[in-house]
Amino acid sequence: MFPADMGAHPAFRTEWWYVTGWLNTPDGKPLGFQITFFRSATDHDAADPSAFAPTQLIIAHAALSDPAFGKLVHDQRVARQGFGLAYAKPGNTDLKLDNWRMLRAADGHYTVAAQAGEFALNLSFAPTQAPLLQGQQGYSQKGPLAGEASYYYSEPQLRVSGSVTRPSHAAAGNANAIDDTSGSRPVTPVDGVAWLDHEWSSTLLSPDSSGWDWLGANFPDGSALMAFKVRGRNGGAVWAHAALRDASGTVTAFDPAQVDFVPQRTWRSPRTNTVYPVAEAVKAGAMTWQLEPLLDDQEMDTRESTGSAYWEGAVTVTRAGQGTGRGYLELTGYQAPLTLQDTLKAAR
């Protein structure tokens, strides 16, 4: 029930608020961005009265995909919840980890501020559509067993405004950039369109799962596409699903037999030696969309906070005879099989 379900659900093992999008700059060169806050309940005794008890962990990732830089730049944070320094509050979206913050106002718009090592995000997101409940009225199956699922809704077509602080060498020569308060890095005003996902679960993945391919895409006519495939350790598909909401608001759902992600081109990371299918064809029923990355090197090496590296990047989404959409593709479990339990252990 909204807005309560937009806040934290501490009784569940894991939860995340995930925002991705494309940004337009004054010079006409697009950027991609991502910010994610995770809340993870640990195995520590929840009845421990100590203010230092690590019963909940807060993890955050942020990234900027800047073609002028040639690769994604990213940062990560992790801390135990407490002392007003790190938290995920129930009741509405209110997230903090040090000087990173994500807050939802009463009118539904979000503000995000994240000062990272090489960049900064200072953005606002205004909803233009109702939330999209994924799966069966917000209960999204992720495996063959009923319990292998998450509570899951999306907010596509968020209208973005604000600014980004880019790496100095990435924006050199950009006449529209202004110096930040230190005078050392350029601040670029931006607008654009974003996508928000919020999921919470205690048993998200089947033991046979290794990771997933996921897409969230916004189209110029107001339609939106979400699709995912959970991959098995044997290389096959454990589960898959897609939902297409058209410009009129009608939602078409596709079952596992109708959905697939087919690699078209791969890229090998020079840092982790992982091979990712950065260009893919996404099939849902009789429709096929082609995904092409804004740039190939959009790997997130977050082994210091979650124990894994993954690829998460801005992609264009095209279909024959239709306009181009802009979305984000997430590829997990290619560097190493992904499990919630391993993530918690690594974060502790």
Image: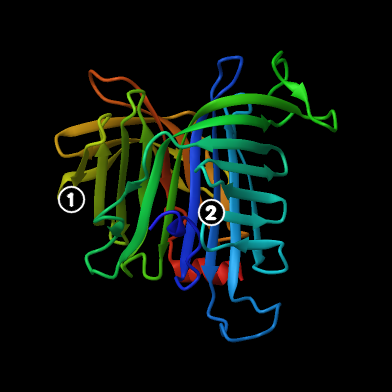
- Local SS, label 1: loop
**How far is mark 1 from mark 2, CA to CA?**
30 Å
Q: Secondary structure at mark 2?
A: loop
Up/down of 266 relative to 56, above or below: above
Identify the residue position indicated by label 2 in the image: 93
Amino acid type indicated by mark 2:
Thr
The quadrant of the picture occupied by the N terminus is bottom left
- The residue under the point 63% across, 28% down is 69
The residue at the point 83 percent across, 32 percent down is 181
Res 80 seen here: yes
Place of residue 185 in the rendered image (x, y in percent of width and height, measured from the top left): 77, 29
Between 1 and 246, the residue placed more toward the observer is 1
Q: Residues within 10 Å of mark 1 (few under 14, many from 20)?
A: some
Q: Amino acid at mark 1?
A: Asp
Whole-percent x, y for residue 312 in the image: 48, 43
Rendered position, 31 above or below 330: above
Front disc: 1 or 2: 2
Across and down, in percent, residue 70 comes to: 59, 29
Where is residue 333 drawn, in percent x and y? 42, 56
Residue hosting label 1: 255
Task: Give the image's coloring scheme.
Answer: rainbow
Q: Is residue 248 above or below residue 82?
A: above
Quick one: label 2, few (<14), some, or many (20+) residues within 10 Å? many
Quadrant of the drawing holding the C terminus = bottom right
